[in-house]
Amino acid sequence: MALIRKRRLTEQQQRRIQKQHKTRQEEADTSQDLEGLVVQHYGRQLEVQALSVPELHPEKPVVAEGEPEPFWKEIEMGSVWRCHTRTNLELLVTGDRVKWQADPNTGLGIITAIHPRKSLLTRPDRYHKVKPVAANISLIVIVFAPLPEPAPGLIDRYLVACADAEIPALLVLNKSDLLKENDPILELLKEYENLGYEVMQTQSDGDLTELSARLNDETVAFVGQSGVGKSTLINAIVPDAAQKTNVISENSALGQHTTTSTRLISFGDGAALIDSPGIREFGLWHLTLDKVQTGFPEIENLLGHCQFRNCTHKHEKQCALRQAADSGEILPRRLDSYLRLIDEITEAQQKN
């Protein structure tokens, strides 16, 4: 079978196509545009919550007596509509602020434009493509628990992703009532606190007043291993969220995936929670080495102080990073985590 080579467009052709898209966008009727918020993603369709209503509401059709009542959906503040998107728009995700138009006759809508994003959380998918997860997040809550056993390397990956997206992180040790005396997890939590990260503890079915207050006025993404209680926390904070929860498998001690799509849930006055599918591995191969360094600020400060410019930080005697780890200035496990990520990214880049 002959291979069909994808034709590469010249810069002039690309500019012409972009100009055509812009012209079509400007010529489109925007008089009926409403403000909306993407609250859930279903393949090519999205659910959009109405943040405004038209100045002149469409009038419901009048039918003669005896004729069947036609379908009609009122455009109301907070109502949720299943929408398609115009073909010239970029891939939309939960949390995007958009302009859209509603069709009360069908109960469907179409997204016509997207507002500039304040932030975007992404991750590579299994096909090595960068996949957007959620937009306009102001805080990422990294949840871990005594069971399943915490993976510090995964937590470090989340923190690198937060640094890359320039989104603050809050580390929450959930189910702290399951901790044993002198549990090493408490030391892990203290290590992150000493590094300058915000931390908090919550208990199974415990009082979440402190956490709820911290999330006020924020758009929050919950991430963490499956089974650590992300959906349970959201259900407790927003009782009508109706998030599905599951019990950890006693055989494998691994969490069962319970959330199948990223969903935004309004919370309090102007705040929202976003629950994303459980992630056991968080690939960062698409980042540059500089981006990884920002996720390890204590290590970044030492880079460039080794004896050799091409120091691998693995065996050299005059390595500033190794010396800092030996003296307790930085955590050896954090250095190992950093080097694993560097090796992972370097290997991926060499393959590409």
Image (spheres, rainbow, N blue to C red):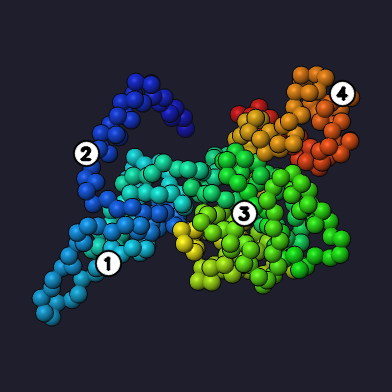
Disc 2, SS: helix
Q: Position of residue 329 (x, y in %)?
A: 83, 37
Which comes sooner in the sequence, label 3 or label 4? 3
Give the residue displayed 63% in from the left and 36% down from the top: 285
Q: Quick check: 330 left or right of 218?
A: right
Disc 3, SS: strand
Which comes sooner in the sequence, label 2 or label 3? 2
For disc 3, the marked residue is: 141
Question: Is residue 277 visible to the viewer in this orientation of the structure?
Answer: no
Q: Quadrant of residue 255?
A: bottom right
- How many residues crowd around disc 1 within 10 Å: few (fewer than 14), some, or many (20 or more)? some
Which comes sooner in the sequence, label 4 or label 1? 1
- How many residues crowd around disc 4 within 10 Å: few (fewer than 14), some, or many (20 or more)? some
- Give the answer, above or below, for where 50 lies relative to 92: below
Please, which residue is most extreme toward the bottom here? Answer: 66
For disc 2, the marked residue is: 27
Q: Which mark is residue 318?
A: 4
Is 181 in front, or is 286? 181
